[in-house]
Image (spheres, rainbow, N blue to C red):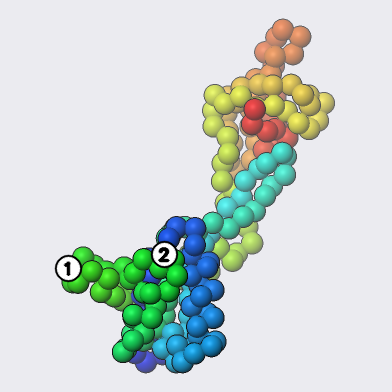
Amino acid sequence: MSESGKKWYVLRAISGKESKVREYIECEINNSDLGKYVSQVLIPTERVYQVRNGKKISKERSYLPGYVLVEAELVGEVPHRLSNMPNVIGFLGDGSKKINEPVPLRQSEVNRILGRIDEMEEPESEMQTPYVEGETVKVNHGPFSGFSGVIEEVNMERKKLKVMVKIFGRKTPLELGFMQVEKE
């Protein structure tokens, strides 16, 4: 634990409203005495790469949707104030105690989640494979632009596809990069 008495807790939030919950908590930290008890608010996210219209698009998405991590010392009214913020459902508990009874995360869980957040900040993450064998794609770059074909093979290491394209009534295999095709 970073500071004495502070532990990591999980707040359950309405899915899709995690960033709003973080904004509310950070606003309270800046405008009231909540800052003495809450030191960090995190939304576990991961970077995902997709190919759209021949362009590699990077976006962040929550890998634990509906959850916000809070490093806090839960004394007095602090748990009540946090669980009654807008879009917050309550604390994640272990089910054996009262409903919404806050249960701190184990240090191993915290390390795993924080390690994954650090990994996300590394520039080259694995691109999400948008293509599967048997899928029909349209070539959008190169000499065969405009032709459609069926994916025969996906090579993740080289980011290449083997596509069977019908040219002059005959099936012809083409090796194309992920950026050269788009889904139909």
34 sits to left or right of 118? left
Mark 1, Cα crowd under 10 Å, few <14 / some 14-19 / many 20+, is few
Mark 1: which amino acid?
Ser
Name the residue: 54% across, 74% down.
23
Q: Position of residue 119 (x, y in %)?
A: 53, 64
Looking at this view, is 169 or 47 the one in front? Answer: 47
Q: CA distance from mark 2 to mark 1?
A: 21 Å
Q: Which residue is mark 1?
A: 96
- Numbered label attached to residue 13: 2
Q: Is residue 92 above or below residue 65?
A: below
Mark 2, Cα crowd under 10 Å, few <14 / some 14-19 / many 20+, is many
Q: Position of residue 132 (x, y in %)?
A: 54, 32
Q: Residue furthest right?
A: 143
105 sits to left or right of 166? left
**How many callouts does the rendering have?**
2
Name the residue: 54% across, 56% down.
61
Q: Residue furthest top?
A: 169
Quarter placement of the C terminus: top right
**Upstream in the sequence, badge 2 or badge 1?**
2
Q: Position of residue 137 (x, y in %)?
A: 65, 27
2 and 1 marks in contact (CB < 8 Å): no
- Whether residue 111 is visible, yes or no, is no
- Numbered label attached to residue 42: none
Name the residue: 58% across, 39% down.
130
Q: Position of residue 158 (x, y in %)?
A: 64, 41
Q: Nearer the viewer, mark 2 or mark 1?
A: 2
Q: Check disc 1 and report its element: helix, strand or loop.
A: loop
Looking at this view, is 163 or 43 the one in front? Answer: 43
Name the residue: 69% across, 47% down.
56
- Whether residue 155 is visible, yes or no, is yes
Mark 2: which amino acid?
Ala
* Res 150 → quadrant: top right
